[in-house]
Image (cartoon, grey):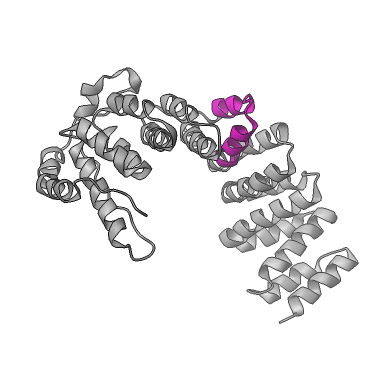
């Protein structure tokens, strides 16, 4: 990777020299973040430093990687004193530097950071927009989503927007799901639903499940979100989750959802689960639950697994389950 490292020594040494001063000057606190985008740059400039770590490496970094990390860290400090020079140096270093600089700058002067990123082109602009959207979502999710949607159409845009929407949905999940259901962009809608529904299910599984039943008819998307919803529902109300999964008409989807739900329930309270199963009326759903539990417990608790298997009324299913729990 032949990337020019402009003024590496000067930048890195400068960062080391002033870094301590910056932390000392700002670590004592600062005024609360402004409400929404109405506040000017001066409101952002008083925010305290967010201490960030250097990039972590899964393998031992080479010299160029270490130099790039040092350069980027230097730029994060430089932007507080000389934003113009920091921007010039970031453009020479590439997308990673632009993203890191944007994250640092937005904490001090969000409006200036946004103006700079919007003036960029190509991958540099994309990196900056994605970073700004993530950084601003907690303060102004509506504006953060606007930034995400300003990216070029594609997977990165969809994933960034979906992340922002998920954070926004924490305050008003019903409104966000309604907005999502009206999206014309199929790729964005699917990405959003895959992120939104499991997150919403953690707080309101009924709302998430109702949305799936009414708004999602793609088998692949159903298979991606239904087990996740049921896992979260089982943590809150496993009996209600079981009643809902019993009504899923598609056999494969019902099997996957039931297995996901039962695994959570078995971990939380295996005794309550077994008593629920005993009370279930004889029939195909009770057999499906027994087959699932026999498989789940076959390797960890063969005695209980066998009880489930023996309670299966369908002869073929019972024989298969008993063979499974009897095989070492």
- Quarter of the image with the N terminus is bottom left
Q: Is residue 41 above or below residue 218?
A: above
Q: Main secondary structure of the magenta part?
A: helix
Q: In the displayed image of the protein, which residue is found farthest to the top?
A: 38
Left or right position of 77 against 283? left
Is residue 120 located in the magenta-colored stretch of the structure?
Answer: no
The image shows a total of numbered marks equal to 0
Image quadrant for the C terminus? bottom right
- Identity of the residue drawn at 80% across and 46% down: 250
Q: Is 37 on the left or on the right of 167, as rendered?
A: left
Question: Would residue 272 be found to the left or right of residue 36 on screen?
Answer: right
Quadrant of the image occupied by residue 193? top right
Q: Residue drawn 80% across and 50% down?
A: 251
- Where residue 266 appears, as percent x and y from the top left, is 62, 61
Considering depth in this image, is 166 or 247 the residue closer to the camera? 166
| Left or right: 176 in relation to 93 | right
In the rendered image, residue 165, in percent from the top left (x then y), is placed at 50, 32
Q: Which contiguous range is marked in magenta?
A: 174-197
Along the viewing direction, whichever of 206 and 170 lies nearer the viewer: 170
Decide whether residue 196 is among the magenta residues.
Answer: yes
Coordinates of residue 267 in the picture (x, y in percent): 58, 62
Can you give x and y, in whole percent of width and height, for residue 95 in the image? 37, 42
Residue lying at 69% horizontally and 62% vertically, measured from the top left = 274
Q: Nearer the viewer, residue 275 or 33?
A: 33
Residue ID at (57%, 28%) = 174
Residue found at the very far bottom of the displayed protein: 328
> Hey, which quadrant is residue 136 in on the image?
top left
């Amino acid at each position: 990777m032949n990337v020019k490292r402009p003024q590496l020594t000067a930048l890195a040494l400068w960062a080391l020299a002033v870094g301590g001063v910056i932390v000392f000057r700002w670590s004592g606190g600062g005024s609360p973040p402004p409400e929404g985008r109405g506040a000017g740059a001066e409101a952002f400039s008083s925010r305290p430093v967010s201490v960030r770590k250097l990039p972590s490496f899964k393998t031992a970094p080479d010299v160029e990687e270490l130099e790039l990390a040092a350069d980027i860290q230097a730029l994060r400090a430089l932007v507080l004193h000389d934003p113009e020079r920091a921007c010039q140096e970031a453009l020479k270093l590439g997308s990673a530097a632009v993203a890191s600089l944007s994250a640092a700058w937005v904490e001090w002067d969000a409006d200036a950071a946004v103006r700079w990123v919007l003036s960029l082109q190509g991958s540099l602009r994309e990196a900056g927009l994605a970073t700004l959207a993530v950084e601003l979502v907690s303060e102004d999710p509506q504006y953060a989503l606007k930034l995400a949607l300003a990216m070029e159409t594609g997977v990165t845009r969809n994933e960034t927007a979906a992340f922002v929407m998920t954070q926004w949905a924490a305050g008003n999940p019903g409104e966000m799901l309604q907005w999502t259901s009206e999206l014309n962009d199929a790729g964005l809608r699917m990405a959003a639903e895959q992120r939104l529904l499991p997150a919403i299910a953690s707080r309101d599984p009924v709302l998430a499940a109702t949305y799936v039943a009414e708004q999602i008819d793609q088998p692949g998307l159903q298979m991606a979100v239904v087990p996740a919803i049921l896992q979260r529902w089982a943590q809150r109300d496993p009996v209600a989750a079981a009643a809902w999964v019993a009504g899923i008409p598609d056999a494969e989807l019902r099997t996957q959802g039931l297995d996901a739900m039962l695994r959570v329930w078995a971990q939380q309270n295996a005794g309550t689960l077994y008593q629920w199963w005993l009370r279930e009326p004889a029939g195909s759903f009770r057999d499906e639950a027994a087959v699932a539990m026999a498989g789940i417990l076959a390797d960890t608790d063969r005695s209980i697994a066998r009880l489930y298997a023996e309670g299966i009324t369908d002869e073929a299913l019972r024989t298969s389950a008993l063979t499974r729990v009897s095989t070492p």
